[in-house]
Amino acid sequence: MAGIRSYGAYVPMQRLSLGAIAGGGRKAGSSSGERSVAYYDEDAATMAVAAATNCLEGFDRAQVDAVLFASTSYPYREKQAASLVAKALDLRRDVTTADFSGSLRVGTSALRSAVDAVKAGSAKNVLVVASDCRQATPRSALEKSFGDGAAAFLISNDAVAATIDHQHSIADEIIDVWRTESDRFVKSWEDRFVVEHGYTASMIEVIKGLCAKAGLTAKDFAKIVLYTPDARSFASVAKRTGFDAKTQVQDPLFGRLGNTGAAFVPMLLVAALEESKPGSKLLVANYGDGAEAFALSVGDGITALRGRRGMAWGLQRRNELTDYDKYLSFRSLQASDPDRRGGQGVSATVHFRDRSEDISFHGHKCKHCGTEQFPFQRVCFQCFKRDEFTEVRLSDRQGKPLSVTFDFFAGTPDPPLVVTVTEVEGGARVYLQMTDVLPKEAKLDLPVEFTFRRIHEFGGTPNYFWKCTPIR
Amino acid sequence: MNYDAIRDKVAIVGMGCCKFGENWDKSPEDMIVEAAFEAYEDAGIENPQQQIEAVFCGAVYPSKGTAEVADALKLFGRPVSMVQNYCATGTDALRFGIFSVACGMYDTVMVVGFDKPKDRGVSGPSAVTTGVRSLPMTPAGWFSLCASRYFETYGAGREDLAKIAVKNHHNGTLAPKSMLKKEITVDDVLKAPIISWPFGLYDCCAQSDGAAVAILTKRELAKSFRDDYVLFKAVTIALGPNPQSDPSFDFLRWKPTVYAAQDAYKQAGIANPSKELDIAQVHDCFTLTELLTYEDLGLSEKGAAKDHIASGTFELTGELPVNTDGGLKTFGHPTGATGVRMVYENYKQLQGKAGERQIKGATTALSHNLGGAPQTCGITIVGMP
């Protein structure tokens, strides 16, 4: 049976208090709670790589046949994200890649396509990754309800932890939330219209449709995992489809995470799977220009996935951000922010030549003397032999900084820039920034791991490389 | 390699140096002419068009290159070439001038080191981006890479660095051509805004504009110019691996200096540098660079730099004064000019013409540049005949 073989999630460490958005600074006022915020070096692509890395932990990456990437906020209008994610994950060259975009529902649309692909036999293992970093108008209600994050699933016919037994979807034409090519911020129509005629109507219809198709009722499910545009509207959908809003609904995490767009339901599904017992059933319902629903049966395999980096892990690692101006700078939304898109940018030909080092984070290992080195060399640092190297993946190893310094002069929205020369297990030395770290935590020889980040935006394009970060 | 190839064969018979600073109202041509005509006068050269047979230039930010120098001085119909070697550019220009005389091809040549970075409209060195990985980073970030490990290993700290800045600021007040003439205190240094830890504002040298010129001739002809000529004992350049990727780096030294020092001391026949050198001008782009250079040049035992700083070894009144003119700290760092400016100071000191900052009886002097990631080091040693 087709289903979920593995899962992973990623919540950016930065949490912005809703009170700060409301304008009260540290004073929470009526807006208690917080939302996740992508750091200045994160976007939909980097968070996708992080979630997918967590999903693939312990699995052979060479087995992945396809990557389906779902997002409404990938930085490029034209140019694929899935191929970037596949390269950063160091997947096979002949991997199938596709992007799903344009609707909040794309996370589950990609999931559905993955299930169809493995059922049809065109792929054995499909990586689905949903990631979003949507930008609301500063200080708007939407900004308080949004969050940033990503989730990933490995979909397979074999050895699955949860089978996907039934699927149902409906399409609906409605202008409720949207963003045109010229809009910087997400727009929406009046919320009571959106909730009543968009969200509630479509969700009830798809849930009822799925139950009818599957011959199941609300009582058959341990939990319903459902999209909600805000902290309240899901209760009515649950109630009107026969679910007990108090005991049967997966916590939508408002006040801790926020609505993470295309990644929202996938992230909530990860949270539900983390708490699910073998033999239980889940109903997953997602919304956006219609709706989509799935019935899942959790199997014994779920216990083997316990403890991996998902929502429990993602929610407990956090850094409180109380300075709203700093958040605006992360998004380059302050009038005083320097134009980080300036300069000539990175030569596409240089990027082309360096992509195995920069995107896959490969180093060289000398076949003759065994010395590992970064970046690629033609002549070995140690034994001076020419061109006797094998490529080795450094991204999934750990390391320790041999040198740490704090640069206040390098342009960054969150100074100082923590700069290191880090020794990767195996011996390669890499000049790396350290991210998601407070300066006082950045010590010599601190165990670190590696995280794919947006290193700068020179030339107006996102430019990606790896950084080190303390293991948490 | 023949370590004796240049020793005592090439003499400096004239030098010039323009006032260093943010020379907004001066062009490169103005500075080159100022330095060159001071050197002509110093050497007693009245007809440079006849007497200068070749010109070796060094600049990192030239607007035109060799033509800038040839046009400014009207030195045509002879070789004019330009080298670039990061912060050791001026030293490398000298090196090619020395070789050209030592090999017998020319009798008298001129070396011009200059740079005009203040015409670029930015405060710091430009960061040229070609690859993703190369940014954002700053020279202060590169040169601070040894700080955390060195401090941890040897117990030194920002206070030790601060004393170097205080010393150089003091020396700079005594040098007529320096840019900054201001005494500072350790407290000033420690309280200044951090640029890149451990470097605060006063731990960093500024960029400035400047030009310096040397006139070299073969030893046999030196006396026809002047009696108090100065001889080259050694000149060298050494490259080291990029400290950001070198698999065997210990972050306690800068390898290029260690390599270049070995070579320079062999050329000069120096076995005990801390005893045999009288003064040194070293590359204090950042205070830690000067501290590490004490050890890398063998002027201090490994790890003991902070003790020497405390006891004043390298002050004007100490046993081995370093950066007698205030160094990059007070002259700023017009990259191509710096190496030649350092030799200008050593030349004046050896001739006893260094005014209030004169070190009595100095006969052997070293100059040192360190540049790039850092990866390149240039050293000269000069002495009296």
Image: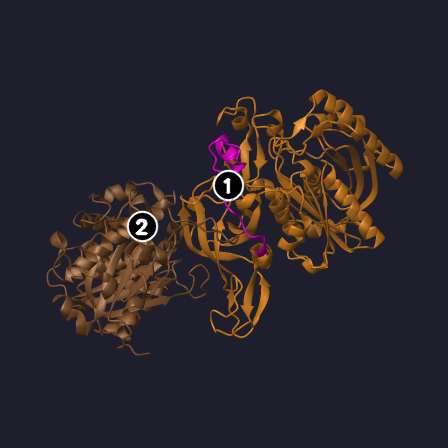
**Is residue B321 visible from the viewing direction of this image?**
no
SS under mark 1: loop
Q: Check the residue under mark 1 and report the chain it is in.
A: A
Q: Is residue A131 magenta?
A: no
Residue under the point 56% across and 48% down? A463
Please say if B153 is above or below B203.
below
- Chain B: give its colour: brown
Residue B250 sits in quarter: bottom left
Question: Label 2's element?
Answer: helix
Q: Where is residue A47 in the image (x, y as percent from the top left)?
A: 61, 45
Q: Residue under circle 1? A: A340
The hue used for chain A is orange
Q: Is residue B312 left or right of residue A5?
A: left
Q: Where does residue B119 sit, x and y in percent of width and height?
A: 36, 45
Going by the image, does A30 lie left or right of B36? right
Residues packed near mark 1 inside 10 Å, few (<14), some (14 to 19) or many (20 plus): some
* Farthest-out residue, bottom: B2
Circle 2 sits on which residue?
Answer: B28
Numbered disc total: 2
Q: What stretch is highlighted in magenta?
A: A323-349
Tell me the crowding category of disc 2: few under 14, some 14 to 19, or many 20 or more residues within 10 angstroms, Cα based. Answer: many
- B297 sits to left or right of A69: left
Q: Which chain carries label 2?
A: B
The image shows residue A137, relative to residue B116, as above or below, that is above
Seen at 56% across and 24% down, the residue is A31
